[in-house]
């Protein structure tokens, strides 16, 4: 399914971005895997490009300064009508704000934050750039999941962004539900499922801590997983069937983890 972007209600995932050490090599990887093309984006944090499917943006890629040696991970941005007010709420509710709020040129206003358990996410107040405009097509981000110790952290997102959390009912790709058990909450905005929160207790990866995971749609999960390995990435969890479709968890060559999901049954926020 394809939808044109509109200004997302607060709490809705609206953009996904990745900061890497080698921007050129990362562009080559995702171009080969997803067919992405690239155009320049805001340069407020250094070199940055927007990935496109056709003429429509789907995600962002940026390059870290050479002296910074940070873990490489996809960052999911939640929509906000007022990034400054959201940053104040994040702090008041036990989270932290690491960057911003600051202007990204004329595109919008952003912040980088973490919830009380330490999971990093972004805040995006749209101006000219509304976020992803190709939603549901192969190669686009279609679902986001928080892997954390206890799903009760959903109350933080409810309070800060006005989401309504409830026990997972099987909507959305939900691959982590098959991996980690039944402590799963669905975040809803205006009654629509937008993300999942998985409380995994002691199964939380020691090298990651709580983190958001992005799911990208593909037409053939097995083929895409093989291609990831051929392109220098790594298959963390090989393709398997779950309650809502076939999935695989992989990393790109710099170690950024993401999930491949079958386009059948995809729910787009």
Image: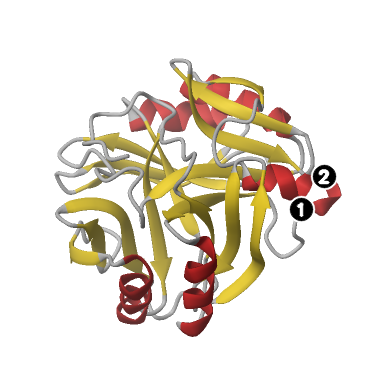
Q: Residue at x 58, y 46 (%)?
A: 245
Q: Residues within 10 Å of mark 1 (few under 14, many from 20)?
A: some
Relative placement, left or right, of 217 versus 260 is left
Q: Label 2's element?
A: helix
Q: Position of residue 63 (x, y in %)?
A: 34, 71
Q: Position of residue 31 (x, y in %)?
A: 30, 72
Q: Residue at x 36, y 70 (%)?
A: 30
Residue under label 1: 204
Q: Mark number for residue 189?
A: none
Q: Residue at x 21, y 66 (%)?
A: 38
Number of numbered discs on residues? 2
Q: Nearer the viewer, residue 11 or 98?
A: 11
User: Is residue 137 visible in this depiction of the protein?
Assistant: yes
Distance from disc 1 to disc 2, alpha carbons, whole Å, reads 6 Å
Vertical arrangement, residue 6 with respect to residue 39, above or below: above
Q: Label 1's element?
A: loop
Relative placement, left or right, of 268 versus 179 is left
Vertical arrangement, residue 40 with respect to residue 67, above or below: above
- The answer to the question of whether label 1 and label 2 lie on touching residues, with beta carbons closer than 8 A, is yes
Q: Residues within 10 Å of mark 2 (few under 14, many from 20)?
A: some
Describe the colour scheme in one phrase. Answer: secondary structure
Q: Nearer the viewer, residue 106 or 41?
A: 41
User: Is residue 254 visible in this depiction of the protein?
Assistant: no
Q: Residue at x 15, y 39 (%)?
A: 128
In the displayed orientation, state which residue is furthest to the right.
202
Q: Position of residue 250 (x, y in %)?
A: 57, 67
Q: Nearer the viewer, residue 123 or 268?
A: 268
Relative placement, left or right, of 184 versus 217 is right
Q: Mark number for residue 201?
A: 2
Quadrant into which the C terminus falls: top left
Q: Position of residue 138 (x, y in %)?
A: 36, 54
């Amino acid at each position: 399914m394809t939808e044109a972007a509109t200004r997302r209600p607060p709490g809705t995932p609206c953009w996904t971005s990745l900061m890497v050490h080698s921007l050129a090599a990362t562009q080559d990887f995702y171009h080969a895997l997803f067919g992405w093309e690239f155009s320049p984006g805001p340069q407020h944090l250094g070199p940055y490009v927007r990935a496109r499917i056709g003429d429509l943006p789907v995600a962002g890629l940026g390059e870290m300064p050479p002296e910074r040696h940070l873990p490489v991970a996809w960052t999911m941005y939640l929509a906000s009508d007022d990034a400054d007010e959201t940053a104040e709420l994040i702090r008041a509710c036990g989270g932290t704000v690491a960057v911003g709020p600051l202007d990204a040129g004329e595109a919008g206003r952003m912040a980088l934050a973490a919830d009380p358990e330490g999971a990093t996410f972004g805040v995006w107040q749209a101006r000219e750039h509304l976020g992803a405009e190709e939603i549901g097509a192969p190669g686009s981000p279609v679902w986001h999941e928080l892997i954390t110790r206890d799903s009760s952290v959903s109350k933080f997102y409810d309070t800060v962004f006005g989401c309504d959390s409830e026990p997972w009912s099987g909507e959305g790709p939900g691959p982590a539900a098959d991996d980690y058990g039944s402590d799963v909450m669905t975040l809803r905005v205006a009654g629509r499922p937008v993300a999942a929160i998985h409380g995994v207790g002691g199964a939380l990866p020691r090298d990651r801590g709580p983190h958001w995971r992005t799911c990208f749609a593909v037409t053939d999960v097995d083929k895409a997983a093989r291609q990831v390995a051929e392109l220098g990435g790594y298959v963390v969890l090989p393709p398997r069937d779950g309650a809502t479709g076939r999935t695989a968890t992989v990393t790109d060559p710099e170690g950024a983890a993401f999930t491949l999901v079958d386009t059948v049954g995809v729910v787009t926020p």
